[in-house]
Image (cartoon, helix red, strand yellow):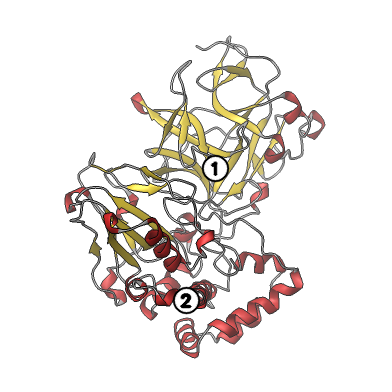
Amino acid sequence: MPSSSSSSSHLVLVLWLSVIFPSFFFQTNARNCLSWGFGEKAPGGQRDLQISVSGDDSIAMEKTVCALYESSESAAGSCTEEEEEGECSLAAQKPIDVGLVVTADGNSYECFNGETSEPLSTVARVDLGCNTRWRFLTYDVWPIGSVIIAGSTAEGYNFGVCRCPVKDKNYEIGRLYLAGPKMGGCGCKQGSGKEEKVLIGEYEYLQADEGKGHLFQDVASNSNAEVAMSDKDLYPALQKLIADHLSEEDRSTLERITDTQVSVLEEDLMKQDPSFLRKIFSHERYIPHPTLNNKGLHLLRCLLAEKIADSRRRQRGYHKHPDYETFMRDGILAKNFSELSSEDIQGIMAMVSGFDINELPPIRWVDRPVKHLAGDAQYQMHVDTFHAAYKIWIYMNETTVDQGPLNFVRGSHRNTPGKLEWLYRMTVPPATHVLKEPSIRLDVDETELGFEPRSVMTTSAKTTFVIADTSGFHARGMAEPGTIRHAMRIEGPYDGGLPRKNPFFE
């Protein structure tokens, strides 16, 4: 049993969580999902919980998670014993690490992070209306959504809670890095005194259905800025986008699918609170609502984002690029990397995204291996989000079917009537599957939606540059478990591709 080995200036707190399913898809406010207090009695509607989860979403675990603080002042300054019946903000306390609860001497408990132990302190509480669970993550799956933020490192990078598998079906608790050089990795110290090991796949992280919020981070986009306009300006801005970018054909298609006139949907949107309109203008992949998605809200956001991106490309003259027609038709380009200059690559990235050249990220290529796993969810065709998103790969060697290369449905990045009909069926309430996984999975053959059968992106050239709009249907090609496929990706917090900006205003 590890012994206490660091100063008493640290405080720790216990994080007790479980899978709790709401009675309806419309979730409790995220800011209430997790709170902290000293008392043994949880306030009404909350419960102190041990981790003991089971079912399709998680693997049973009986250990208790705890968090360590940088100093006593950072925790005690916002959580006091007088507040034991109330809430204490996790964000204000800023824990810097997580660990597992262990017994110190038979009478007391400590928090052990694989390196040091600290005395236990405040207890974490989960709102009964929230749905939290462990989600298994395979390789090269980033960004992800609905992470419960557990704290920030000493360097200021937010992290969530993850767990690394160890022998005998046990787990070590670690930090899921949401920013910084380790972004997307689960860092665990597996064994006393060992250095942190950062996994890039085959780990689980703590997730909630609610999207971005006070204690949550939706990292499905790198654009987290608020819409820079006053509340009263939101309404005419939405009306102008609809008037400027929806064609009569678009309106007719939406009305046929939803059996609702666009003018009726627009009128209902004008009755919403400004906070809801800000969600509409955000990058959030799906916005739950009891009636508006029946009237076509999600489809409206898809079409507006597509048409705005089209307009941006033409305004900047990218329709003159030699690869423009091919990309607009297929949603994917494959080029011989050895024949491309740095300027060529920048030009392709700008044309595809509609970005100005100076908006493109610095390019530094890093190897990102993918290990194939049995039952990988990435084998199922899906869309990443409702708006265009651009991922890039460089395959350094010939890529064969046996290696499980990218599968892509050409043309599916466009919101055709067939795709819109499918999206409508998937996003009308209760849409519990979309709340759980807003990268919506294709549940029919793509040919039933009017597309040609998927293309398998094998390569014959030794170095092949591939860029794809992953709002189109795509999947990881299947391969024998344990097969490792290598590809070079752009280093940075963009999932190996281009930044995901606000699709309406950036």
* Residue at left offset 66%, top offset 54%: 29
Image location (x, y in percent) of residue 487: 31, 47
Q: Which residue is drawn at 36% across and 78% down?
A: 418
In primary-sequence order, the first of circles 1 and 2 is 1
Residue 490's spot in the image, x, y percent? 41, 49
Asked whether residue 138 appears in the rendered view, the answer is no
| Residue 179, disc | 1
The answer to whether residue 36 is left or right of residue 1 is: right
* In the image, residue 387 above or below residue 449: above
214 displayed left or right of 136: right
Looking at the image, which residue sits at the far right?
A: 82
Give percent across and percent down for residue 224.
Answer: 61, 55
CA neighbours of label 1 inside 10 A, class few (<14), some (14 to 19), many (20+): some
Residue at 23 percent of width and 51 percent of height: 478
Mark 2 residue element? loop
Give the number of the disc on residue 317. 2
Residue flagged by tag 1: what amino acid is it? Ala
Q: How crowded is mark 2: few (under 14 residues within 10 Å), some or many (20 or more)?
A: few
Q: Which mark is residue 23?
A: none
Q: Where is residue 91 in the image (x, y as percent from the top left)?
A: 68, 40
Q: What residue type is labelled 2?
A: Gly
Can you tell which of label 1 and label 2 is closer to the viewer?
A: 2
Tell me the quarter of the image containing the C terminus: bottom right
Q: Nearer the viewer, residue 101 or 379?
A: 379
Nearest the eye: 463 or 29? 463
Q: Which of 210 and 505 is in front in this view?
A: 505
> Quarter of the image holding residue 185?
top left
Instruction: Please report the residue visible at 60 percent of the width from the left and 86 percent of the height from the top.
Output: 263
Kind of element beneath mark 1? loop
Q: Is residue 157 visible?
A: yes
